[in-house]
C-alpha cells in the first residue's frame, strides 16, 4: 500500500456512506494520532487499539463513528490534500479556514499534528494532510 492515510480515510468515508457503526483500520502511530485528533475535535465518537483478529501479532484501530439525531453522519466529506506523489506544504499565513470554520484541516507540523485553527494560532505551517467537513 503506497498511501496508508488515504486508505484509512477511504475506509471511514465508505463506512459513513452505508451508516456503519464502526470501522477497523490497521494500526500505525500516525493513523492513531490522526484519529485521536478527530476524536478530540468531535468528528468521531471513540478510538481504541485492539488486537487484530486476522493475526495476533498485529494491532488494529477500532473507530466508532459519530452520527447526528436524524442518523446523518457528522463527517460529510473527507478529502486528501497532500499525497505521496504531490506533497502540499503551507505557511501559517497561507492556511485558510475550511468551509469558513465549519470544517477542519489536519496539518503535520514540526510540533506534531494539529488542526488548521491551532496552526494559525501558534503561527506554524506544515504539510496539509487532509480536510474534513
Image: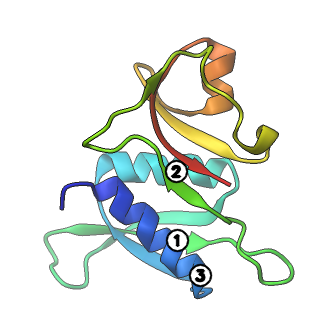
Q: Position of residue 111 (x, y in %)?
A: 45, 20
Q: Secondary structure at mark 2?
A: helix
The quadrant of the picture occupied by the N terminus is bottom left
Up-down relation of residue 121 to residue 9 (above or below): above
Q: Is residue 97 left or right of residue 38?
A: right
User: Outermost residue toward the right?
Assistant: 69
- In this view of the protein, which residue sits in the foreground, 36 or 85? 85
Kindly identify which residue carries mark 3: 17
Residue, disc 1: 13
Q: Quadrant of residue 133?
A: bottom right
Is 126 placed above or below 8 here? above
Q: Nearer the viewer, residue 51 or 84?
A: 84
Q: Is residue 70 visible?
A: yes
Residue at horizontal 61 percent and vertical 25 percent from the top: 95
Q: Earlier in the sequence, mark 1 or mark 2?
A: 1
Q: Is residue 62 visible?
A: no
Q: Is residue 129 above or below residue 22?
A: above
Mark 1 or mark 2, whichever is nearer to me: 1
Q: Residue at x 28, y 57 (%)?
A: 4
Q: Which mark is residue 36?
A: 2
Q: Secondary structure at mark 1?
A: helix
Query: Marks 3 and 1: in contact by CB < 8 Å?
Result: yes
- Mark 1 vs mark 3, CA separation in Å: 6 Å
Is 96 situated left or right of 32 in this image?
Answer: right
Please report the residue visible at 62 percent of the width from the left and 62 percent of the height from the top.
77
Measure the alpha-carbon separation of dots 3 and 2. 21 Å
Marking on residue 52: none
- Depth check: 71 or 58 in front? 71
Within 10 Å of the Cα at label 1, are there few (<14), some (14-19), or many (20+) other Cα atoms?
A: some
| Badge 2 density bin: few <14, some 14–19, many ≥20, Cα 10 Å | some
Residue 17, picture quadrant:
bottom right
Amino acid at each position: 500500500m503506497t498511501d496508508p492515510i488515504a486508505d484509512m480515510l477511504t475506509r471511514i468515508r465508505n463506512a459513513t456512506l452505508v451508516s456503519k457503526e464502526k470501522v477497523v483500520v490497521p494500526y500505525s502511530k500516525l493513523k492513531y494520532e490522526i484519529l485521536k485528533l478527530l476524536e478530540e475535535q468531535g468528528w468521531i465518537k471513540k478510538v481504541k487499539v485492539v488486537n487484530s483478529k486476522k493475526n495476533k501479532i498485529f494491532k488494529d484501530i477500532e473507530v466508532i463513528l459519530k452520527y447526528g439525531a436524524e442518523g446523518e453522519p457528522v463527517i460529510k466529506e473527507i478529502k486528501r490534500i497532500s499525497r505521496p506523489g504531490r506533497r502540499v506544504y503551507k505557511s501559517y499565513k497561507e492556511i485558510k479556514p475550511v468551509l469558513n470554520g465549519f470544517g477542519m484541516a489536519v496539518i503535520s507540523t514540526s510540533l506534531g499534528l494539529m488542526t488548521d485553527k491551532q496552526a494559525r494560532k501558534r503561527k506554524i505551517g506544515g504539510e496539509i494532510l487532509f480536510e474534513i467537513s
